[in-house]
Image: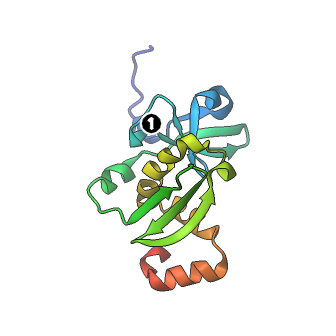
Amino acid sequence: MKFDVDYLNLDQQLTQPKYFNYSDVKDRLVKVAFDIVKFRESDAIDGLWQIQQTNDGEIIVATYEDEVVKQASATIDWEARANATGNSVTVFYKGEPVTKFATVQYGIPAEDAHLVCKYVPEKLASNVDFRKKMLNELSNDDRLELLKKFPELND
């Protein structure tokens, strides 16, 4: 019985996002940006996870579905640079500064700022929700000015 396959629900089971209870794995995670984390032992982009709130508590959900494959060959217009001490990160779009944030604001240790600079541009380029979340943190005037200059971000 344990080797029986339910073909009617197989597609649904295979496409269900992989997740873990946050409390079970939080000591093995490193915060990359905003609500995105990765396991300490993973360097690959497919190791990115998003913290989500559910009725049963916080979980982390895999974020590396088809979007990573689609983005792999595309040009990334996003860039992130940490300052010399790793206390802040500036995010750029097509060479224009978009926002600057303190790493401590998101619980990111200064020594992990390089991880933010590595993963945030790829995530901004491939994940519309992540990009909208970052843009919504801008002031109204700054967001409108950015969207006027780069209307493609208005998706």
Q: Is residue 82 left or right of residue 109?
A: left
Q: Position of residue 61 (x, y in %)?
A: 55, 41
Q: Position of residue 67 (x, y in %)?
A: 38, 53
Which residue in the rendered view is the most extreme toward the front? 84
Q: Position of residue 122 (x, y in %)?
A: 41, 55
Determine whether the residue tagged by mark 1 lies in a helix, strand or loop: loop
* Numbered circles on residues, count: 1
Which residue in the rendered view is the most extreme toward the top? 1
Going 58% across and 33% down the picture, which residue do you hit? Answer: 29
How crowded pointer 1 is (Cα within 10 Å; few <14, some 14-19, many 20+) is rated as few
| Amino acid type, callout 1 | Asn
Colour convention of the picture: rainbow
Q: Is residue 143 above or below residue 84?
A: below
Q: Is residue 59 above or below residue 147?
A: above
Going 58% across and 78% down the picture, which residue do you hit? Answer: 143
Going 31% across and 50% down the picture, which residue do you hit? Answer: 69
Q: Nearer the viewer, residue 150 or 18?
A: 150
| Quadrant containing the N terminus in the rendered view | top left
Q: Badge 1 is on which residue?
A: 9
Residue 155 shows up from this direction: no
Residue 101 shows up from this direction: yes
Q: Is residue 1 left or right of residue 88?
A: left
Q: Is residue 14 above or below residue 81?
A: above
Going 58% across and 64% down the picture, which residue do you hit? Answer: 100
Q: Nearer the viewer, residue 126 or 82?
A: 82
Q: Is residue 12 above or below residue 98?
A: above
Q: Nearer the viewer, residue 92 or 73?
A: 92
